[in-house]
Amino acid sequence: MPPKRVLNPQSIFDQASVEEAFEELKIRPQHLHSLYSNLILRSATDYDEIVDFPKKAKDYLSQNYVLSTSKVIHKKVSKSGDTIKLVVRLQDGLEVESVIMFYEPLSLKPAPENDEASEGETKPKLVADGTSRRATLCISSQVGCQMACTFCATGTMGIQGNLTAAEIVEQLMHARKEADIRNVVFMGMGEPLNNYKNVTQAVKLMIDSRYFGLKPSRVTVSTVGVIPYILKLATDLPKVSLALSLHAPNQEIREQLVPSARSYRLDKLMGAIDTYQEKTGNKVFIEYVLLSGVNDLPEHIDELGELLRDRDVTVNLIPWNPIYSPEIEFSAPGAESTEYFKNTLKNKYNIRCTVRQEKGQDVSGACGQLVLETQAQRGANADCGTADIEDLMSPGAREVSPAPKCNIQ
Ligand code: SAH
């Protein structure tokens, strides 16, 4: 169990608690609706901006809630402008990262001289030109992670806490100041299905057509394979997309990379995926981090091909992004072996396959890496990439996508 976090004040985006309070105070539900539509759609920053909002509600909310419990303390735009990494500090001092990845190239202009950096932030040399561009947001669900995948930066941190639903939603609120967010992928820090209640509550607000209005299929929950919650997700949020971090074609290799595979064995996991697909009719995205000599050899391609050939999946190959940790001894695959892996899956097994391209390496987005890096040396560059998640999301996904990466994942 993650350590319990004591949080005070509460965030206004803790919708369940506000709803309960309104019921107790006998404030009509229509005011709840006007509260969130003003905050989300009209970016209201004061309850006085909400027309006909009862004084009782205003007073109660002002005393008990704040509009944001978290703040962006570090922001970095990649040189190419296709990625923006945000480090978000939570009210108890813990930090998570979110990554914004743009569909179209960003038009950048030099930052104005008087553009002050906030606390801990490196003053940007380039800033967006102000046009609102469509983007994917890679979001965190926990601080750290207990799954301890052996190649993952967040895995080295251990678990420090679950994010509240409001803290998850606040990441979207922060990102919307930078871009027009069309997709959300839970590929930041943490295992979303280990924080099921808060993640699903946040997702419900994100896909609520009255508020953020994201298309459910454009919200992707990525899991390393927590079987009971994969099945529960099929019932609770059947239209939301699912990505499975498989990373290995057999039980033995999977156990080396993903320790939780000892509890959730590969055969049972694939059975759960089948049940999920029967219930939802959704295609499932399979993430497969390529680690040179470990899981990228020709026999692994064949085994993976056999495992997936009759399933409705798209495989997203992720060349490993090296991370800073003395214990980690993996190496990234070469471009040729990645290409061979992809082509074999496609041509021999007829499996749809994309490769996540490196992008925005200069801003460092690998799973948990930005936070680790910025804690160690704020403002420095790190060596890692991002992902072509929006290719993965869109129906017309490209074969090899020269698109953004979310190394965060
Ligand atoms: N816990 C969830 C989501 C977080 S990580 C999950 O496992 O799916 C999102 C993706 O990024 C996962 O597929 C994860 O294995 C991958 N990832 C983590 N560290 C990476 C690294 N250094 N290089 C490439 N992919 C990485």
Image (tube, grey):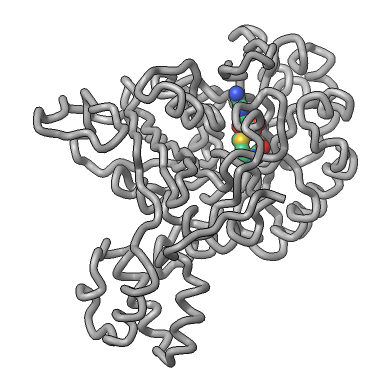
Image-based side of 339 in relation to 103, left or right? right
Q: Does residue 164 appear to the left or right of 380 in the view shown?
A: right
In the image: residue 395, left or right of residue 249: left
**In this view, 45 is above or below 128:** below
Which quarter of the figure is the C terminus placed in? top right
Q: Residue at x 40, y 89 (%)?
A: 28
Depth check, front residue: 401 or 346: 401
**Residue at (51%, 41%) from the top-left corner?**
394
From this viewpoint, which residue is outermost toward the left? Answer: 113
Which residue is located at x 76 percent, y 26 percent?
Answer: 257
At a point 40% along the width and 17% down the height, the residue shown is 381
Counting from the top left corner in percent of width and height, residue 59 is at 30, 81
Residue 27 in the image: x percent, y percent? 40, 89
Q: Position of residue 97 (x, y in %)?
A: 47, 38
323 vs 224: above or below: above
Q: Is residue 12 above or below residue 318?
A: below
Compare residues 249 and 186 and report the one nearer the observer.
186
Q: Is residue 91 left or right of residue 235?
A: left
Split into quadrants, the picture shows ligand 1 in the one at top right
Between 297 and 119, the one nearer to me in the picture: 119
Q: Quadrant of residue 203?
A: bottom right
For residue 227, say whether it is visible.
yes
